[in-house]
Each structure stands twice: as C-alpha cells, then as structure tokens.
Image: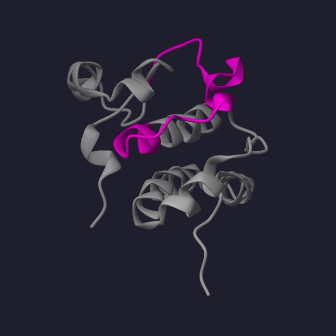
Amino acid sequence: MWKPPTVDDVAQDAAALLHEDDEALARRTIYRFIEHYDNASWDERSEMVAHQPRPTGNQRLDALLAGCVEFSCATHGLAAPGWVNAPQYFLDQFWFVAGVRALEADAMANSPISFARRAIFLNRHSLTYA
C-alpha cells in the first residue's frame, strides 16, 4: 500500500536531483509535497512532518521545504512542527523563485506568509497542481 512521502523523503529526493544538477526538478519535487500532504489522511499528515528533514545541500531549498510544510499545515488548520522555525530555514537575502524581475512586486505582495517570512517570494499559483 502506498504511503505519502515524509518531509525527509522529499528532502533526500531533492538532494539527489541537486547532485544531478537539476535544481528546477528539485524545486518541483518540493512543491509536490503540498499535493501529497493535501491527499494524505489526518494521521499520515502528522507522520509526514513530524521529524526534521536532513539538509538538501542547498539552503534555499531547505527553506522552501520548511515553507511548504508550514503552508500545508496552515491550509489544513494544523500546527506546524517546531523544527520549521529553526534558523537554517530562513534566508538572509530575498529569493524571488521565478527569477523574473517583472514578477518581483507581485511575488512580494502575494507570497503566502509561510514563504515571505523566510524571504522567499513566489507566485501563489506555483503552489497549485493539476
């Protein structure tokens, strides 16, 4: 029987993709955590985020993953695990994920707080899935 991935599973998949120089796919893998969380049962959700993940090797992606966990928990009215507040999950410089200067103002205005408080700015539609 299939079980949704834990946050550590996602971090390790992202780390493997970074090792293959595919940061874009690593980001998509992290975003996909939201879909897995949305489709999980209440009990599975707790298990998915209970333990702090191992680092991916990229501080931005570690912060993005923590933001996805916090966002997912908030979406479902659950408290985020305490590890998401550890200093390594916050960036010192703004990161505009799209990398398109013309989209920066929109990203700053519309990024969910789970990401903006980490200095990560993205289009809310990045977090939806088909």
How many numbered discs sit on the rendered protein?
Answer: 0
Report the colour scheme: one colour
Viewer-closest of 43 and 5: 43
Q: Is residue 129 left or right of residue 49?
A: left
Please say if 119 is above or below 72: above
Q: Quadrant of the C terminus?
A: bottom left
User: 94 and 40: which one is in front?
Assistant: 40
| Direction top: furthest residue | 92
Hey, which quadrant is residue 122 in on the image? top left
> Does residue 47 show up magenta in the picture?
no
Q: Does residue 74 show up magenta in the picture?
A: yes
Q: Residue at x 37, y 24 (%)?
A: 113
Give, as a single range, the part of the protein colored magenta: 71-95
Residue 91 drawn above or below residue 62: above
In the image, 80 versus 71, the foreground residue is 80
Which part of the image, by quadrant, shows the N terminus? bottom right
- Displayed quadrant of residue 13: bottom right
Residue 110 point in image, percent of width and height: 23, 26
Locate residue 118, reporting x and y percent. 51, 21
Q: Is residue 112 left or right of residue 30?
A: left
Taking the view exactly as shown, the residue that stands out farthest to the right is 54
Determine the residue located farthest toward the bottom in the rendered image.
Answer: 1
**Is 13 on the left or on the right of 4, as rendered?**
right
Residue lying at 74% horizontally and 45% vertically, measured from the top left: 51
- How far across and how far down the image is residue 4, in percent? 57, 69
